[in-house]
Amino acid sequence: MRWLMLCREPRLYSCKRIKNACIKRGIELDILDPNKMLLMLNNGKFEVFYQQEREHYAKSYSEAVLLKDYDGILPRFGTSSTEMGCTVLRHFEAKGIPVLNNAQAFALARNKWQSLQRLVEYGLPVPKTNLAGDLVSVKSQLNHFSFPLIAKVLNGSQGNGVMLFENRHNAESVLSTFRQVEEAYLCQEFVTESKGRDIRVFVIGDKVVAAMSRTSAAGDFRANLHQGGIAESIELTEEEKILAIKATQVIGLEVAGVDFFRTANGVVVLEVNASPGFEGIEQINEIDIALEIVDYFIRKISKLS
């Protein structure tokens, strides 16, 4: 069996772990950058070419080579590659190749606003949030919130592009600048009960395989591990497990990282991540998440064949 992982950084922990898991299962895994792919619609066929690396900066690139078909596709590309990555993923889907996750769900998860819309549509609780058009004043947008306030750029990840504003003056100043440079963002209530702590749940299929709490580093309100947060293993209630699985399925994903807060009024879902890293959650739970992903995909492909 031969799979392809769409990823720009094969040295990332998650990519290397999945590569090792594939080796354990006798699967050949190529890791290729979707931004180096040339897609072709040719006489009713969906073709994919790949631009090979040049050997020296002074030499020109060699011709892009036609890729052979794969048995499965694993998307693990970052936010900067979302548009091309999803386009490539859709091309492979059109060829009839199984994927994990599909392009439509992946793109939805990457859009912070549209994914929240979908969660609310299916009755899942999310923080009070708004998104304003260019002709709506920043003042009008902020009138719907008290402070402190969270603002998030729509294409941020790993805690980047998330800001906490303690007062209206600072919020208006920064967000007005965002408007001028056409950086899309949303505003969101600050859940004071979180106190720099959230929960990440790793879901594969209809199963919760691991969970962890994340506590922010001193002086930072973001609990993300890439921002210096501290991870601990945590026990989930059955209700929380059901909620995490539902959030994953509502977005249309099969593998996801679901982030939420615990509050006095229940759980509040923050985000559903389509390409979650798992270094921290795998290590503190002593669970081989990479192998869980590979085994799940093997079962899926077997059912489809």
Image (cartoon, rainbow, N blue to C red):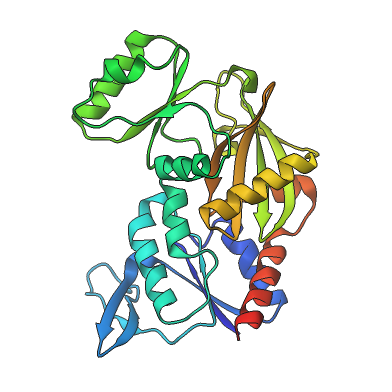
Classify the position of the N terminus by image quarter. Answer: bottom right
Q: Does any portion of residue 8 appear in the rendered image?
A: no
Name the residue located 23 percent from the left edge and 28 percent from the top edge: 179
Give x and y (percent) for residue 190.
52, 20
Looking at the image, which is closer to me, 111 or 34?
111
Classify the position of the C terminus by image quarter. Answer: bottom right
**Residue 19 placement, left or right of 139:** right
Q: How many marks?
A: 0
Give x and y (percent) for residue 149.
45, 18
**Residue 292 placement, left or right of 48:** right
Q: Does any portion of residue 205 appear in the rendered image?
A: yes
Quarter of the image for residue 19 reads bottom right
Looking at the image, which is closer to me, 140 or 64?
140
Which residue reaches farthest bottom?
43
Name the residue located 60 percent from the left edge and 37 percent from the top edge: 225
**Residue 148 placement, left or right of 22:** left
Name the residue located 41 percent from the left edge and 33 percent from the top edge: 161
Name the residue located 22 percent from the left edge and 69 percent from the top edge: 58
Give x and y (percent) for residue 224.
58, 35
- 64 to 152, vertically: above or below: below
Give x and y (percent) for residue 285.
78, 48
Quarter of the image for residue 182 reads top left
Looking at the image, which is closer to me, 57 or 169?
169
